[in-house]
Image (cartoon, rainbow, N blue to C red):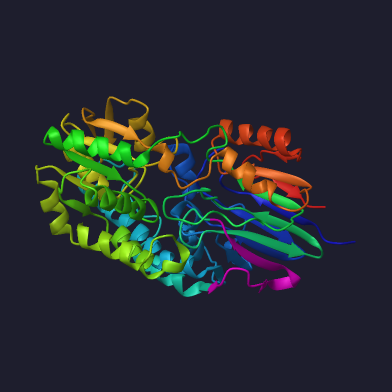
Amino acid sequence: MQAPFQVQFIGATGTVTGSKYLLKYDRYKILIDCGLFQGIKNVRRRNWSDLPFSASDINAVLLTHAHIDHSGYLPALMKRGYHGPIHCSDATKALCKVLLPDAGFLQEEDAKYANKKRFSKHEPAEALYTEEDARKVLKQFKSLPFHQKLELPGGMTAEFFPVGHILGASAIRLEYRGKSITFTGDVGRSNDVVMYPPEPLPQTDYLVVESTYGDRLHEETDEEAVIADVVNRTAQRGGIVLVPAFAVGRAQMVLHVLQKLRAQNRIPHMPIYLNSPMAIKATEIFYDLHDLHKLNKEDCEKIDSMTHYVKTVEESIELNGRKYPSVIISASGMASGGRVLHHLKTLVGDPRNSILFLGYQAAGTRGDAMTHGAERIKIHGLYFPIKAEVHNLTALSSHGDYREILDWLKDMPGKPKKVFVTHGESSAADCMRLHIQDELGWHATVPEYLDCEILN
């Protein structure tokens, strides 16, 4: 009798964070993605909970892309006993070299700050992992090009396909004894400002698809005009525009848009700062990998010459004290951590200023609260009144909406036996399930946390 081939959903169920899928076959176990849970406190607590498997029993980890909600638990997995290979695309490996140590550093800094100010309920507050832990796990990374077959233990094969979203983002198709399952990871836009559209997927028996925007369409918006309007009105008030942006993808995109607007004299020639060591390093990688995005070398050089890079803590503190009109881009994109929090504390209480978010804000994050009309925001144990203008330009999201994803799936040959809808809030995932069933005629379901499915 053939051993079961099954998948367990350990993250990205009822939430857009914590992506983890455990694939079991014969006596082997493969983990697809290994992300941090973020947002609502009850969800974040899962980062500290016991895993539903032994880390030392995992034979390999495969990453769809570098974002922390897909890769950020890897150092913790290593601490729990995993010392095997981590397979990913070349660009994902390059970006993880930046993102993971930074994530460890920020956790250490947050713990130190919590202990200093005594606002944590834990005595003492501790980091889930350190910068040193993150640098250790990087030694386990093994990258490969798109479309190259990867041989895994027990006769399983894997292949990576580009899906836009960010540099190196991949769908992963795995095959075992004639059965196949494909994980889309995060799917990019059909007409992104800087990234190429996702490549059509090959035939697959089972499909795990994201649903971040499963219940909505992106607005038909002139993004450049909206950004220009926010910058101009804020400058006229003598204020500062703060842009919380993901260090990989959105930071580079908004710099490109601002450079175009300034070159066309549609915004003033005010200073534009990138205040995120992680985003600065990611931007350097972005410049180097011209073949993976739409911007050429000249475009990147124009962005580089326009941007003031804030690298040291001292420079960041000095920037936080300046009052003249400027644009500050800082991570993280949902205002869940990083240097952006210090800027928020300084800027959010002044009606002359503007806070411009760029895309999806997970439930429970400060970005979600602010874009839904919160009157005050809690940062480092204290509350700050929100008097600055708050905007969210969702049309600049790096995720395809349900129409873009459905149109992409239509190009896939054949019909999957079953589709598992994940990586979305509960309502978004269920809406995506209905769209897939009604428009494509495919059998779709929304798995719950820790559900297991036998793949017959």
User: Quadrant location of residue 275?
Assistant: bottom left
Residue at screen point 50% across, 46% down: 399
Where does the magenta region start and end? 143-163
Q: Position of residue 335 (x, y in %)?
A: 32, 43
Residue 361 visible here = no
Q: How many marks?
A: 0
Q: Residue at x 56, y 54 (%)?
A: 198
Image quadrant for the N terminus?
bottom right
Q: For the point 47% across and 51% down, which residue is it?
A: 69
Q: Is residue 90 left or right of residue 452?
A: left
**Residue 45 placed where, x, y %?**
46, 43
Residue 175 placement: quadrant: bottom right
Camera-nearest residue between 326 and 150: 326
Q: Is residue 177 above or below residue 270?
A: below
Q: Position of residue 322 (x, y in %)?
A: 9, 46
| Residue closest to the eye, 5 or 360 | 360
- Whether residue 151 appears in magenta in the rendering, the answer is yes
Q: Tell me if residue 35 can be seen.
A: yes
Instruction: Residue at 49% x, 53% y: name it.
Output: 165
* 131 to the left or right of 214: left
User: Magenta includes 430?
Assistant: no
